[in-house]
């Protein structure tokens, strides 16, 4: 229960917690929605949990709206890069385990 309490406490410190939620979910990527996204990003810029919010949005996969100061379109390459880095890390760990196994180290 402590993890949930900690997470709820962290999200309660978000700068957006007192803002209009609709501000963070522009309905398009042009016209007035561009200004709306900029306003949402300005709130994110002063948020103490901005990085945790961005990490959440990247880990969650395609998620609409402005999270951690980024739009879905801006997060897409970050998410793809993260998947590649995790795959490389996993492959590196597997190669290290094989090498250790060949040396008789378990």
Image (spheres, rainbow, N blue to C red):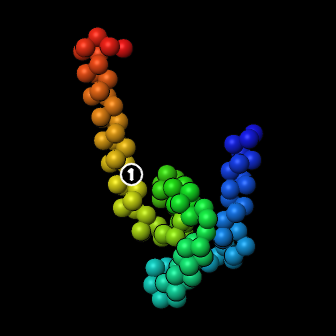
The number of numbered badges drawn on the structure is 1
Asked whether residue 27 appears in the rendered view, the answer is no
Under circle 1, the secondary element is helix
Q: Residue at x 43, y 64 (%)?
A: 75
Question: Where residue 20 appears, x then y in whole percent?
Answer: 69, 77
Q: Residue at x 56, y 57 (%)?
A: 52
Asked whether residue 18 appears in the rendered view, the answer is yes
Question: Where residue 15 appears, x then y in whole percent?
Answer: 66, 70
On screen, residue 69 above or below 34: above
Query: In front: 72, or 46?
Result: 46
Relative side of 5 to 56, left or right:
right
Query: In front: 21, or 50?
Result: 50
Q: Quadrant of the C terminus?
A: top left
On screen, residue 69 above or below 96: below
Question: Where residue 22 appears, x then y in whole percent?
Answer: 64, 76
Query: In front: 61, or 69?
Result: 69
Give the farthest residue toward the bottom. 31
Q: Quadrant of the N terminus?
A: top right
On screen, residue 3 above or below 31: above
In the figure, residue 92 lies in which quadrant? top left
Q: Residue at x 32, y 48 (%)?
A: 84
Q: Residue at x 27, y 28 (%)?
A: 95
On screen, residue 23 above or below 105: below
Relative side of 14 to 80, left or right:
right
| Residue under numbered circle 1 | 82
Label 1: few (<14), some or many (≥20) within 10 Å?
Answer: some
């Amino acid at each position: 229960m402590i993890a949930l309490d900690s997470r709820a406490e962290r999200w309660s410190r978000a700068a957006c917690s007192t803002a209009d939620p609709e501000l963070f979910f522009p309905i398009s990527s042009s016209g007035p929605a561009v200004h709306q996204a900029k306003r949402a990003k300005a709130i994110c810029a002063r948020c103490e949990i901005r990085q945790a919010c961005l990490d959440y949005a990247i880990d969650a996969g395609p998620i609409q709206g402005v999270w951690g100061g980024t739009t879905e379109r801006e997060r897409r390459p970050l998410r793809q890069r993260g998947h590649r880095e995790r795959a490389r890390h996993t492959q590196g760990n597997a190669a290290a385990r094989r090498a250790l196994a060949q040396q008789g180290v378990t």
